[in-house]
Image (tube, rainbow, N blue to C red):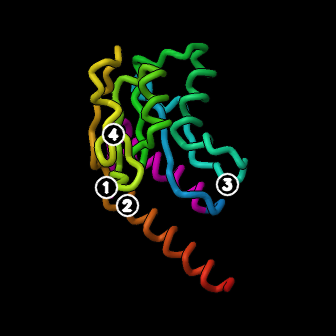
């Protein structure tokens, strides 16, 4: 199915393309894009295993790239599309970067910090609020993760 360029579904499809790049590198397949004025300004995916860096999540990668491109750490007028609900570290980075809106593909019931395990975005004490939307391509975003971890378990069982 084709979606109009610039639509929420189109941007999440682009984040999914990033997740597939991570998958091809045997990284947890999570992808993200940052959008400003209807255009993607940053793309990224997990590279935690490749770089041996526990902070190298898709969200951190795109925030770093967007800040470098814009020459500021304030991303107020930017939207972030990510295939999996952010963890605590990434949720904090999203708030710190002043991202305006967050679009999440699927929830993370084990480590999600935007409603599943905890909800960092709903802490009243923070001076920045992020608008959150869930479920864009929920099934596809969930399926890539399920397939990845199924294959990972199979590889590990074949090694023993």
Marker disc for residue 49: 3
**Quarter holding the C terminus?**
bottom right
The residues tagged by marks 2 and 3 sit, at their Cα atoms, a distance apart of: 20 Å
Q: Which comes before the other along the chain, label 4 or label 1?
A: 4
> Are the residues flagged by discs 3 and 1 in contact, CB closer than 8 Å?
no
Task: Kindly report which numbered mark, 3 or 1, lies closer to the viewer in this rendering.
Answer: 3
Picture coordinates of residue 15 (x, y %)? 46, 46
Give the residue drawn at x 49%, y 15%. 74
Which corner quadrant of the image does residue 91 belong to?
Answer: top left
The residues tagged by marks 2 and 4 sit, at their Cα atoms, a distance apart of: 16 Å
Write the start and end of the magenta stretch as one range.
Answer: 1-23
Picture coordinates of residue 84 (x, y %)? 41, 49
Q: Element type at marker 4?
A: loop
Q: Which residue is mark 4?
A: 114
Give the residue drawn at x 52%, y 57%. 29
Marker disc for residue 142: 2
Task: Kindly report which numbered mark, 2 or 4, lies closer to the viewer in this rendering.
Answer: 4
Q: Viewer-proximal residue, 98 or 38?
A: 98
**Quarter holding the N terminus?**
bottom left
Say if 125 sits above or below 46 in the image.
Answer: above
Q: Which comes before the other along the chain, label 3 or label 1?
A: 3
Q: Which residue is mark 1?
A: 138
The residues tagged by marks 3 and 4 sit, at their Cα atoms, a distance apart of: 24 Å
The residues tagged by marks 3 and 1 sit, at their Cα atoms, a distance apart of: 25 Å
Q: Element type at marker 3?
A: helix
> Are the residues flagged by discs 1 and 2 in contact, CB closer than 8 Å?
yes
The residues tagged by marks 1 and 2 sit, at their Cα atoms, a distance apart of: 6 Å
């Amino acid at each position: 199915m084709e979606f109009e360029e610039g639509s929420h579904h189109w941007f999440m499809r682009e984040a999914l393309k990033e997740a597939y790049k991570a998958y091809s590198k045997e990284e947890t397949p999570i992808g993200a894009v940052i959008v400003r004025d209807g255009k993607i300004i940053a793309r990224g995916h997990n590279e935690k295993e490749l770089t041996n860096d526990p902070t190298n999540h898709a969200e951190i990668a795109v925030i770093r790239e967007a800040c470098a491109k814009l020459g500021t750490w304030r991303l107020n007028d930017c939207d972030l599309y990510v295939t999996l609900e952010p963890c605590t570290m990434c949720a904090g980075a999203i708030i710190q970067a002043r991202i305006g809106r967050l679009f999440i593909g699927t929830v993370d019931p084990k480590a999600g910090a935007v409603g599943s395990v905890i909800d960092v975005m709903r802490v009243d004490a923070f001076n920045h609020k992020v608008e959150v939307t869930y479920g864009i391509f929920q099934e596809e975003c969930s399926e890539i993760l399920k397939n990845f971890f199924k294959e990972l378990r199979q590889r590990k069982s074949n090694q023993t």
